[in-house]
Amino acid sequence: MKKLFILLVLAFVAFAANAQTNNFSLAKENYISVPTDYTLTNTTVRTFIFDVRGCSWETKQDYLIQIDSLAGNHTNVAVALLGAKFATGSYSAIGSAVNWKGTTIDTTIVISNASATLWNFFKVTVTGTGTGTSKIDAQELKLYNQ
């Protein structure tokens, strides 16, 4: 019975972790826009995967995210951009995570990569700490041909 309970808990954790990942693909040759709103809490890391396999040349990248405070205040929201060549491969950090301390009602964060790369997948992780909730208003990923 104990093993069954542990298996059920592990299955629930895997399902919950998977439910917070959103996947997007190139709509145009070098640009993805995500106007969908997502709520960010302090209990769950939001992960977004951008599939850019349609772009078969080296690129430099700009990633933009707009965040609004909803209720309470996050003491920090960390946004990290990572890149990988394969969906099942390991991701490499693109620069350092950018932190928003929640001291303003909203913010726009831009992460730029000035080094040309051949990554096919980009992963963004957004982590909130503190007791507030925030809304991810919009995201954009722009690729620049090299």
Image (cartoon, helix red, strand yellow):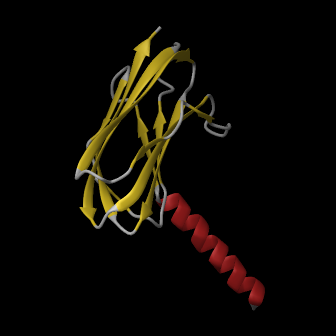
Instruction: Name the foreground residue: 55 vs 46.
Output: 46
Image quadrant where one finds the N terminus: bottom right
Quarter of the image holding residue 83?
top right
Q: Please, is residue 115 above or below residue 80 in the view?
A: above
Residue at image location 26% in from the left, 57% down from the top = 69
Q: Can you give x and y, in whole percent of width and height, for residue 12 in the image?
A: 58, 73
Left or right of 130 in this view: 36: left
Q: Please, is residue 14 above or below residue 8 in the view?
A: above
Residue at image location 63% in from the left, 71% down from the top = 11
Q: Please, is residue 5 above or below residue 46 in the view?
A: below
Left or right of 4 in this view: 87: left
Q: Residue furthest top?
A: 146
Q: Residue furthest left?
A: 105
Q: Please, is residue 54 above or below residue 63 in the view?
A: above
Quarter of the image holding residue 29?
top left
Quarter of the image holding residue 64?
top left
Q: Can you give x and y, in whole percent of width and height, for residue 67 in the image?
A: 30, 48
Callout count: 0
Q: Can you give x and y, in whole percent of width and height, for residue 93 in the image?
A: 59, 34
Left or right of 134 in this view: 57: right
Q: Can you give x and y, in whole percent of width and height, for residue 129 in the image?
A: 45, 61
Residue at image location 70% in from the left, 77% down from the top = 7
Q: Residue furthest front?
A: 103
